[in-house]
Image (cartoon, helix red, strand yellow):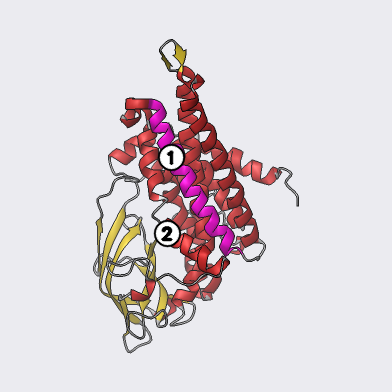
Amino acid sequence: MDFSPDPDHQAVVDAVDAVCARFEDSYWSDVDERHEFPWEFYGYMAEGGWVGIAIPEKYGGGGQGITEAALVLNRVAASGAAMNGSSALHLTMFGLNPVVKFGNDRLKETFLPRAAAGDLHVAFGVTEPDAGTDTSRVATRASDDGGGGFIVSGRKIWTTKALESDVCVLLARTDGEPGSFDGLSLFLVDLDPDHVDIRPIPKAGRNAVASCEVAYDDLPVEGWRLVGERGQGFRHLLHGLNPERVLLAAMACGIGEAALRRATQYAREREVFGRLIGANQAISHPLARAHMELAAAWNMTMLAGWRYDNDLECGEHANTAKFLAAEASYAAADHAVQTHGGLGYATEYHVERYWREARIQRLAPVSQEMTLNYIAQNVLDLPRSY
């Protein structure tokens, strides 16, 4: 095994860090408070080619792997942008992966160059009010229109970035009834305001990038907008779950790094009872533990990304990375708040924002409990519990 530093990866890190240095914590707290998409930041990242890093070179992208995309999102989150910065990018960076893997030539040629340039914004519509973790319950219907196309009606929730997006990778039922994974198909649909109603869901954090309820009312979809095979949408979707977990793990590690950086800086400067608080083991030991946990999670994230990029089985590794990173990120953010004492709850020091955004990682895109179920069943060969 070769653990030597990769100069190409270091070049990615240095370049992304340079862009992110333009945007201080005050920028991110401001867009979060105003629920405003970070357009200026997004523009710089698109101009640098980072949004298209994982799109094939044939379509104008960087042609890099999930490992390199994870590096980008990790540095964005670690800069203090946390989820507000990384979520602004990752759906365009990776949301079109099913199109890359399974899309027809017309789909690829129409949309991938725009995504690579950063001027196509993409949402992902899977979750529904009655179909969260149990995707088999998806009821949004794509009915045949009699001319080779489809008419889509239904309701999705937690559709990230729908307000800013041009298109949505949408999972809908073309055949059968809710309760089966068969009959689900993927589409790349326009978010046409004449047939689509988008409403943001009020939430605790990551408010610069909205999560939305999206209602589809007889949305016409041309036949060539079907991604892959009819009725195989869930299986096409599964192909993208492992790399998504790698990217979310990378973001989580970045949030933890930002929180730890703030906490250690404060612990080196804050004096109470005549001594720096960082000298107290009640402060230093949790921060040291957080550092080690984040390092372990990051190493697993890189291993999972490397295995995916080298076409090796990585389900165990990707799920483990996501679980460990979510736990480590939240612990680091929580210790950062505790280190600051009462000031940790104040917006001035930013750690409360990291804390709120780190909490998301333990819920989405899959809960910690379902990740444990995956490992128990698929790695340890234990009976299914649900």
* Horizontal arrangement in the rendering, residue 192 relative to residue 372 (left or right): left
* Contact between labelled residues 2 and 1, with CB atoms less than 8 Å apart: no
Residue 12 picture location, percent across and down: 61, 44
Which image quarter holds the C terminus? bottom left
Does residue 130 lie above or below 78 as drawn? below
Residue 58 picture location, percent across and down: 61, 64
> 10 Å neighbourhood of mark 1: few (<14), some, or many (≥20)?
many
Disc with the residue nearer the chain's start (1 vs 2): 1
Foreground residue among 93 and 149: 93
Mark 1 or 2, which is nearer the eye? 2
Q: What residue type is labelled 1?
A: Ala
* Horizontal arrangement in the rendering, residue 65 relative to residue 254 (left or right): right
CA gap between label 1 and label 2 equals: 27 Å
Q: Is residue 77 visible?
A: no
* 186 inside magenta stretch: no
Disc 1, SS? helix
Which residues lie in the magenta part? 314-340
Residue highlighted by disc 1: 81
Residue highlighted by disc 2: 369
Q: Residue at x 47, y 47 (%)?
A: 327
Foreground residue among 85 and 3: 3
Q: Which residue lies furthest to the bottom in this view?
A: 146
Q: Can residue 336 be seen in this view?
A: yes
Does residue 300 lie above or below 149 as drawn? above
Foreground residue among 289 and 171: 289
> 10 Å neighbourhood of mark 2: few (<14), some, or many (≥20)?
few
Q: Which residue is drawn at 70% across and 43% down?
A: 7
